[in-house]
Amino acid sequence: MEAYGSSRPASGADHQIAHIWEMEGRNSQGQKVAHGAAVAVGTWAVLALYDWLLEQDIENLDIARTLSQSPDLARREGDLHRLFNDHRIGARANTELRAKHISSDLHKERLERIIEGWPQTRDRLRQQLVSAQEMAGMLRAAGVPADPGDIGLSLADLIMTVRKAAYIRRRYTILDFLHETGLTEYALHEAFSNYEKRCQ
């Protein structure tokens, strides 16, 4: 981070998720959830999304359909303001959203590049990432929170947090990838299915 001059190389969607809980003052068992604990659970959540994504048939994504169903900036701003109760946070998130919103032409170009490069990207991700289950095991072995239940969160809390997290930083993460490919809602409801079963 010091060499780059920013936290960008080490702070992705996991930190965006953690920052939502911190900004909301998330408490568990009467104590504020520590930054490290929030990042640990955020990391588990992001890896669960990757586990799901790596099984998807991205090469056959329907570009025309994805573009036609993609919300425009006005709709995303409306969604953002419904998600954030704190107007100060919402205003800052809206600035970030506007900074990274792309035109339809650029969206189409990105989708074409995603489809073309997906086999290689998928292989590289599989080499670099551990599964959410493996990460949970390592976190538990270290004695730290390993999934949302460990900090008092329900499945609904987790899904709401991930929705919010997509708006708060102008850096490209898996949350932006899911949005641009039109897969966000599928991912949110399918990637955490094992956690949902454990909550029942």
Image: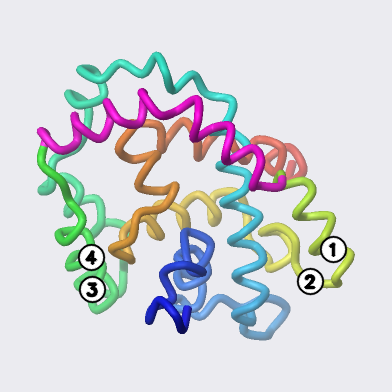
Q: Which residues are magenta?
A: 104-130
The residue drawn where x is 15% and y is 59% is 98
Report the disc number at residue 92: 3
Mark 4 is on which residue type? Glu
Mark-to-mark CA distance, 4 and 1:
34 Å
Indicate which label's residue lies in the foreground, 3 or 4: 4
Q: Secondary structure at mark 2?
A: loop
Mark-to-mark CA distance, 2 and 1:
6 Å
Mark 1 is on which residue type? Arg
Mark-to-mark CA distance, 4 and 2:
31 Å
The residue drawn where x is 58% and y is 41% is 125
Using a 10 Å C-alpha cutoff, classify the residue at mark 2 as few (fewer than 14 neighbours), some (14 to 19) or many (20 or more). Answer: some
Which comes sooner in the sequence, label 1 or label 3? 3
Q: Secondary structure at mark 1?
A: helix
Which comes sooner in the sequence, label 4 or label 2? 4
- Give coordinates of residue 89: x percent, y percent: 29, 75
- Give coordinates of residue 151: x percent, y percent: 69, 68
The residue to which callout 1 is attached is 140
Mark-to-mark CA distance, 1 and 3:
35 Å
Give the total of numbered labels.
4
Report the disc number at residue 96: 4
Q: Are marks 3 and 4 in contact (CB under 8 Å)?
A: yes
